[in-house]
Image (cartoon, rainbow, N blue to C red):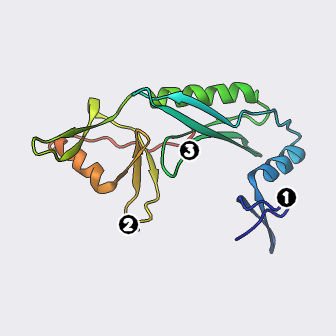
Amino acid sequence: MNKCEQCGSDDVRISITAGESMSVLCLNCYNEQMAKELEVEMEPLTETFTLNDFQGVSRTFIVERRIDPIGIFMEAKERGMFGYKFAVHGELYCNQDELLNTLIEKTSKGIEEQQVETKFFPNGQAYNLIKNDYFTGLIEYDENSENTPLVIIDGRPFTWEEVGKMLKAYEGFQIKIKCYDFTD
């Protein structure tokens, strides 16, 4: 396992290749290096925040910032293996508190509406139903299937087959699939 070349952390996230040499850094060391090179002040940033979802369930998000030559990226990732994930992008010299507030607002809006409802047949078998004829989700790698992704909806992972079963209720309908950047 790689360790950060500057602080020794096991949480290596960034690999930088220059010519034939490569260095590996944790996100904190990378941000410090980029902030120094780009002359950007790293404003103090909250590490977590908690919001209630559409069911009133408390969800805690870990905040990560990444400083790049093209701007500042912030991501809110729900604790756990799968869950909600949101991101925003700001200009390099933006107000980082405002960017964080934009991220929190985006997260709040993203968890306020239920998109998939679980119901039960008379025999007790569960099935999932798309509410309001649409859903938004995040495409993730499925380590159990090398050919199809997982789709994270309502902070829950659904296999491609499960999404297909939900769409069967719309047989004969038109479908519109739109993929867009994580920070939009």
User: Could you tell me the amino acid type at mark 1?
Assistant: Cys
Q: Where does residue 130 sit, x and y in percent of width and height?
A: 27, 37
Name the residue tied to disc 2.
Answer: 147
Dot 3, how many residues are within 10 Å of its Cα: few (below 14), some (14-19), or many (20+)? some
Mark closest to the chain's N terminus, 3 or 1: 1
Q: Position of residue 23 (x, y in %)?
A: 80, 66
Q: Which residue is mark 3?
A: 79
Question: Residue lying furthest bottom in this view?
Answer: 20
Left or right, 44 with reference to 54: right
Residue at the outermost left position: 122
Q: Regarding mark 3 in the picture, which secondary structure is present there? A: loop
Between 35 and 6, the residue placed more toward the observer is 6
Task: Name the image quarter holding the C terminus.
Answer: top right
Residue at disc 2, secondary structure: loop
Q: Position of residue 183 (x, y in %)?
A: 57, 39
Kindly report the distance in space between the C-alpha atoms of the residues bearing marks 1 and 2.
Answer: 38 Å
* Residue at the outermost front position: 124
Q: Of label 1 and label 2, which has the lower sequence position?
A: 1
Q: CA distance from mark 3 to mark 1?
A: 24 Å
> In this view of the protein, which residue sits in the foreground, 53 or 176?
53
Q: Residue at point 31% right, 35% down?
A: 134
**Separation of marks 2 and 3 at Cα, in angstroms:** 26 Å
Q: Earlier in the sequence, mark 2 or mark 3?
A: 3
Q: Residues within 10 Å of mark 2 (few under 14, many from 20)?
A: few
Dot 1 falls on a residue whose secondary structure is loop
Q: Are marks 1 and 2 in contact (CB under 8 Å)?
A: no
Q: For residue 129, which quarter of the picture?
A: top left
User: Which residue position is annotated with label 1?
Assistant: 7
**What is the number of the mark on residue 67?**
none
Indicate the amino acid at tag 3. Arg
State the quadrant of the N terminus.
bottom right
